[in-house]
Amino acid sequence: MFQLISDGGCDFTKEEVQKHNIDIIPFYVMLDGNTYLKEGVDITKDEYFKRLKEDKNLFPKTAQPNPQDYVDIYTPHLKAGKDIISLTISSKFSGTYNSATLAASMVKEDYPDRTIIVIDSLNCAIGQGLILKEMIKMRDKGFSITKTAELAEEIIKTVKIYFSLDTLEYLKKGGRVGPTTALVGGLLGLRPILHIVDGAVEQLDSVRGKDRVLALIEEGIVAALKDEVQNINLSVGHILREEDAVNFKASLEKSLGTKIENPVVEVGATIGTHAGPGALAIAYCKKYETFVK
Amino acid sequence: MNNWFILAQVLGVITIIFEFTSYQIKNKSKYFLTTGIGSFFWLTMFFSVGMATGMDTQISLMVAASYSTVRNLVFWKIFAKNTPQSKEIGLNFLLIMIGVALVAGVLSIINAPEQVRWLHTLGMIAALSFVIGQYLPGVHYVRITVTFYAIIVILTQTPLNILYGDFRWNIMGIAIEVAKIVSVIVFYIRFSKNPKQPQLQFAKP
């Protein structure tokens, strides 16, 4: 048995972390310009986004876990004779992958016989969460660390994640859209849809109308997945938009004719700072079983 | 009938081919490239007519055609790049284009005889909505607004008469506008026959 570790980008709940016996290394968020808080430890996602929504002038910063954070989590497992797989948020978003890799090389000096595999998810939020969930299933089935890592790399190639944003305001604050685009897009009621391509965020399209965007996303998802829905693991996430997310999930289950096992997830600060309150996310990937001959 | 006039007719036919083709294309950047090339031939058509009949009558039409060509080709580059920076530049460019069309439209309304001012006002609204429709996402806005614009232009009996200010029959100009309307109709016939495609294309895992 090996230990699975992820950064906080995977958006696992505390209950999921305990149930699946994994370790989460939180990101840091700074709201007041002075103090960094550990997300999910010093401040909940809900509190974080409520403050973001209430204070329009607030533009928080996020920071990656440092190598020492990883060393502190790695060491007890290595001491107990366990190997480790460490999954990180896309290296194109954050230096977390570097922190995890650096920490691995540091602890390897003391535990040369142990295996530590660091995997770049090339994803974030519920996309990263799906990869972790597939890895948990493999671990629980008794797969070796190398087989799990090898299949995880295959799964990563299949992960797709889309975000429907309620406003362009946070993209403007993060410098992802210009002021004119934000102003005109806001006047026209445009809602951008973002996705991740090769580990980086890109805009897929824009759609007018809050309800219309969800209907179009559902239509697009059904068209993409209907032929192989039994091979797909799917997850829905949101930022301060739980009711819509739950309804969207129910509607999607009906359209796809299948139950979505994963609960609706509240997306964290790393991507949420750029997406802002009101965002809705959907991610899917192939199940590990589709790669097992 | 001199050679310049014959050349103008040939250029007009080439314009029709490109304009017709452009409204069969769903991809935004390819649409702008095709319609941009069409606008360029449209410009050269006015130039050839000018060489045949005198340039003074064609200058305002050439200015308008140049405006279309530059706008379409700039939008082509912007949509082909599809980065936040290019979009920001594109939107600023769009606002400038709207400003130019607004000023030109208001001037033409002011200078027009009172009995045809309504037509000039409609022309300005049609031109502005078309420019905005071209920029908006999806395949429908641009086709709806170009149809409205083409009808208004045909109503004036001579394309871009709203800028020029007199009434003349211009068969080739009308044919170009009719080609756009026919192309939109053909597009929707094809659209209705094809299995319905989702507006948002999501990748398979």
Image (cartoon, coloured by chain):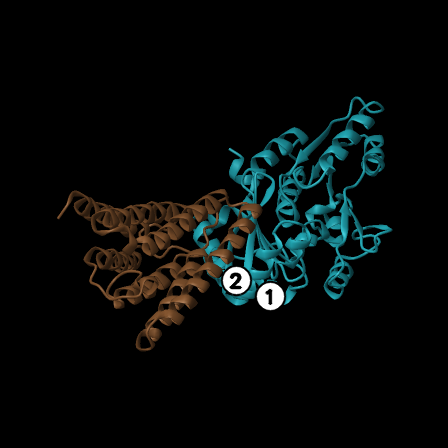
Element marked by disc 2:
helix
Q: Which residue is mark 2?
A: A214
Chain bearing tag 1 is: A
Of B170 and A192, nearer the camera is B170
Side of A117 where A166 appears, left or right: left
For residue B154, which quarter of the picture? Answer: bottom left
Among the chains, which one is brown?
B
Element marked by disc 1:
helix
- In the displayed image of the protein, which residue is found farthest to the left? B1
Which residue is drawn at the image coordinates 65% and 45% (left, top)? Answer: A124
The answer to whether residue A237 is seen in the rendering is yes
On the image, the x and y values in percent for residue A214 come to: 52, 62
Q: Above or below — where is B96 with respect to B73?
A: below
Q: Amino acid at mark 1?
A: Asp
Q: Which residue is mark 1?
A: A244
Label 1 with label 2: CB-CB less than 8 Å: yes
Count up the numbered dots.
2
Of B117 and A154, nearer the camera is B117
On the image, the x and y values in percent for residue B36 come to: 36, 47
What colour denotes chain A?
Answer: cyan
Quarter of the image with the N terminus of chain A in it: top right
Circle 2 packing at 10 Å, graded few (<14), some (14-19), many (20+), is some
On the image, the x and y values in percent for residue B66 come to: 37, 50
Q: Amino acid at mark 2?
A: Leu
For residue A265, which quarter of the picture? Answer: bottom right
Of A42 and B35, nearer the camera is B35
Chain bearing tag 2 is: A
